[in-house]
Image: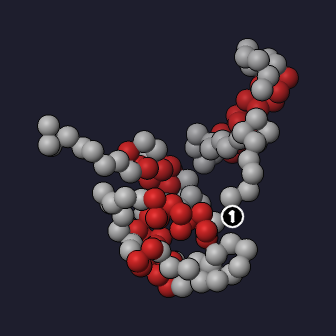
């Protein structure tokens, strides 16, 4: 079926735009917007050398394109520190209310003390 979607973006799986509406400080832009606004303005430098790098072929729209060159570029300009998922986790509060942050803290504590009902990581 030629009408079936074959190219997927991050937002097809993770609805960060909804999170950004609910959480004022969480701003989301598209990759294309990032590349136009930041990379094409010469604001991206190679990590470790500080040499200005532009996207491959100065391309900003990668929809439907082979993305390996883009990911290679992003690895050059990004700092990708070693991360141990069993030592550190990301959690986003369910709302902007202070109680939501307290709920996260309580959940973490119950996980760490074993009262959550699952094995401690």
- Residue 15 position in % (x across, y down): 44, 46
- Label 1: which secondary element: loop
Instruction: Specify whether residue 54 is in view.
Output: yes
Q: How is the image coloured?
A: secondary structure
- Residue 102 position in % (x across, y down): 73, 38
- Residue 17 position in % (x across, y down): 44, 53
Quadrant of the drawing holding the C terminus: top right
Identity of the residue drawn at 60% across and 63% down: 75
Q: Is residue 112 left or right of residue 85?
A: right
Identity of the residue drawn at 38% across and 74% down: 59
Could you say which is closer to the camera, residue 13 or residue 61?
61
Could you say which is closer to the camera, residue 32 or residue 80?
80
- Residue 44 position in % (x across, y down): 58, 78
The extreme right residue here reads 113
Q: Is residue 106 left or right of residue 12?
A: right
Q: Is residue 18 left or right of residue 121?
A: left
Image height of 85 relative to 80, above or below: above
Residue to which mark 1 is pinned: 79
Q: Is residue 96 left or right of residue 64?
A: right
Instruction: Specify whether residue 110 is in view.
Output: no
Could you say which is closer to the camera, residue 50 or residue 101?
50
Identity of the residue drawn at 14% across and 37% down: 1
- Label 1 CA crowd tier, 10 Å (few <14, some 14–19, many 20+): few
What is the number of callouts on the image?
1
Identity of the residue drawn at 76% across and 35% down: 86
């Amino acid at each position: 079926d030629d009408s079936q979607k074959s190219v997927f973006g991050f937002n097809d799986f993770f609805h960060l735009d909804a999170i950004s509406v609910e959480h004022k400080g969480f701003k989301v832009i598209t990759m294309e917007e990032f590349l136009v606004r930041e990379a094409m303005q010469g604001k991206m430098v190679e990590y470790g050398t500080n040499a200005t790098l532009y996207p491959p072929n100065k391309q900003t729209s990668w929809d439907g394109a082979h993305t390996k060159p883009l990911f290679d570029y992003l690895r050059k300009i990004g700092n990708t520190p070693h991360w141990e998922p069993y030592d550190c986790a990301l959690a986003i509060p369910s709302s902007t209310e202070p109680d939501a942050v307290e709920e996260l803290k309580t959940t973490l504590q119950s996980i760490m003390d074993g009262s959550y009902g699952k094995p401690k990581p």
